[in-house]
Image: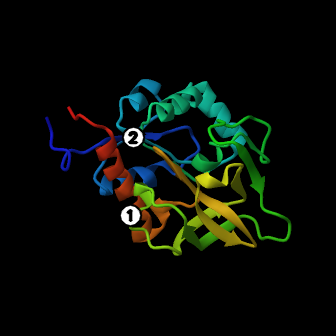
Amino acid sequence: MNDLGTAKPKIAVIDYQAGNIRSVEKALTQSGADAVVSSVPGVIESCDGVVFPGQGACDSSMLNLRSHSLDHLILRLISNEKPFLGVCLGLQLLLQHSEEGDEDCLGLIEGTVKRFPQGHKIPHMGWNEVNIRSDHPVLSGVPNNSYFYFVHSYYADPTDKNVIAGTTTYGIEFCSAVAFDNVVAVQFHPEKSGDVGLKIYENFVQFTKMSRGVLS
């Protein structure tokens, strides 16, 4: 049996043709994980934790997920309490619907993904502050009002405001992070956000270690 503090957790990076995959893989490896990039359900399910990254459009991304049977897999893994981290589109697709397209999203979180109101330069791109509202372990040690890197034209608007773990202001105040139980998802890109972003990946690796129980 490996020691809990030293064994590398195996973390899947879901490859659904819509992600900043290699940067996420590199950040996880640098943070002490054995990162596995895959679109194969059995491979993803065998891992200790899951990262769901994304850049791209809602409809094409949901169609890609469904074509690989990854939509039901993601919901099942979350239901089974596997540590889960969503990034950018990986946050938005957790909601029910998006104004960006016609396809239903995963529906884990009640609410809609909305486009920024007219009068705002779109996309919201560059560094911006995140007001941390949660003490979730994956956000532990991240200084409040730290700057993270954003690239997006839509934002998640959860019905249950209690799941909101971070907010950012870009003309309006919007949800830039959610956290509950084994789920954390962020609108910004931690892998593009320097040391403070790497801290989130390091925390997720540690959270996965602590969550997986008995190690082989």
Residue 72 screen position, x and y as percent: 57, 27
Q: Quadrant of residue 154?
A: bottom right
Could you tell me which secondary element the residue under label 2 belongs to? strand
Could you tell me which secondary element the residue under label 1 belongs to? helix
Residue 216 screen position, x and y as percent: 20, 32
Left or right side of 27 for 161: right
- Tag 1 near tag 2, CB within 8 Å: no
In the depicted view, which residue is nearer to us: 135 or 2? Answer: 135
Identify the amino acid type marked 1: Lys
Looking at the image, residue 177 lies above or below residue 44: below
Left or right side of 131 for 123: right
In the depicted view, which residue is nearer to us: 133 or 32? Answer: 133
Q: CA distance from mark 1 to mark 2?
A: 17 Å
Residue at horizontal 61 percent and vertical 54 percent from the top: 162
Residue at horizontal 59 percent and vertical 44 percent from the top: 18
- Kindly identify which residue carries mark 2: 49
Mark 2 neighbour density, 10 Å: few (under 14) some (14–19) many (20 or more)? many
Looking at the image, residue 68 lies above or below residue 7: above
Looking at the image, residue 126 lies above or below residue 3: below
Left or right side of 202 for 19: right
Could you tell me if residue 34 is visible in this image?
Answer: no
Residue at horizontal 42 percent and vertical 42 percent from the top: 83
Residue 195 screen position, x and y as percent: 39, 70
Q: Quadrant of the N terminus?
A: top left
Q: Earlier in the sequence, mark 1 or mark 2?
A: 2
Looking at the image, residue 64 lies above or below residue 156: above
- Kindly identify which residue carries mark 1: 199
Could you tell me if residue 74 is visible in this image?
Answer: yes
